[in-house]
């Protein structure tokens, strides 16, 4: 399965990646499964992507982490934003 994955705001800086085309060797039928796969990259990735304050959008719609995924979906990780 292939996904376009985007990391926004502080996640882009922490993970040193703004976006990628991610090809999963195993089927990722849910967002949770994709997050689990990405988290195997190391502690920094696991902490960043499993942080409950980070929202996730699939195809530009905010979703729950147990949401289904389809090959070709765009997944975006959005940390909380503060302003002033």
Image (cartoon, rainbow, N blue to C red):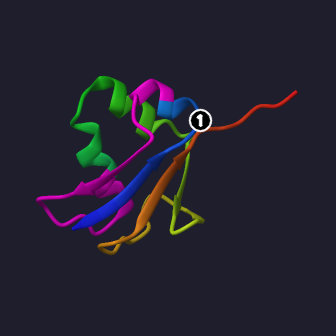
Taking the spot 50% from the left edge, 33% from the top edge, the residue there is 11
Residue 18 in the image: x percent, y percent? 45, 40
Q: Position of residue 17 (x, y in %)?
A: 40, 36
Q: Nearer the viewer, residue 79 or 72?
A: 72
* Picture residue at 29% right of the left edge, 73% below the top: 71
> Is disc 1 placed on a helix, strand or loop?
loop
16 sits left or right of 42 in the view: right
Queried whether the magenta region covers residue 18, the answer comes back as yes
Q: How far across and down, in percent of the image, does residue 81 sit? A: 71, 36
Could you tell me which quadrant the C terminus lies in?
top right
Front one among 29 and 83: 83
| Residue at (49% x, 35% y) in the render | 51
Residue displayed at 25% across by 65% down: 2
Near mark 1 (Cα within 10 A), the count class, few <14, some 14-19 or many ≥20, is few
Quadrant of the image occupied by residue 57? bottom right
Q: Is residue 26 left or right of residue 16?
A: left
Q: Which residue is mark 1?
A: 9
* Residue 15 highlighted magenta (yes or no): yes
**Residue 64 drawn above or below residue 46:** below
The quadrant holding residue 31 is bottom left
Label total for image: 1
Task: Locate the N terminus and report the quarter of the image it occupies.
Answer: bottom left
Span colored in magenta: 13-34
Q: Is residue 46 left or right of residue 78?
A: left
């Amino acid at each position: 399965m292939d996904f376009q994955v985007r990391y926004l705001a502080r996640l882009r800086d922490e993970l040193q990646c703004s976006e990628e085309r991610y090809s999963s060797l195993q089927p990722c039928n849910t967002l949770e499964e994709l997050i689990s796969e990405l988290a195997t990259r190391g502690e920094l990735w696991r902490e960043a992507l499993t942080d409950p304050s980070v929202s996730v959008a699939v195809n530009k719609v905010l979703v729950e982490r147990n949401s289904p995924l389809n090959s070709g979906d765009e997944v975006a990780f959005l940390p909380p934003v503060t302003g002033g």
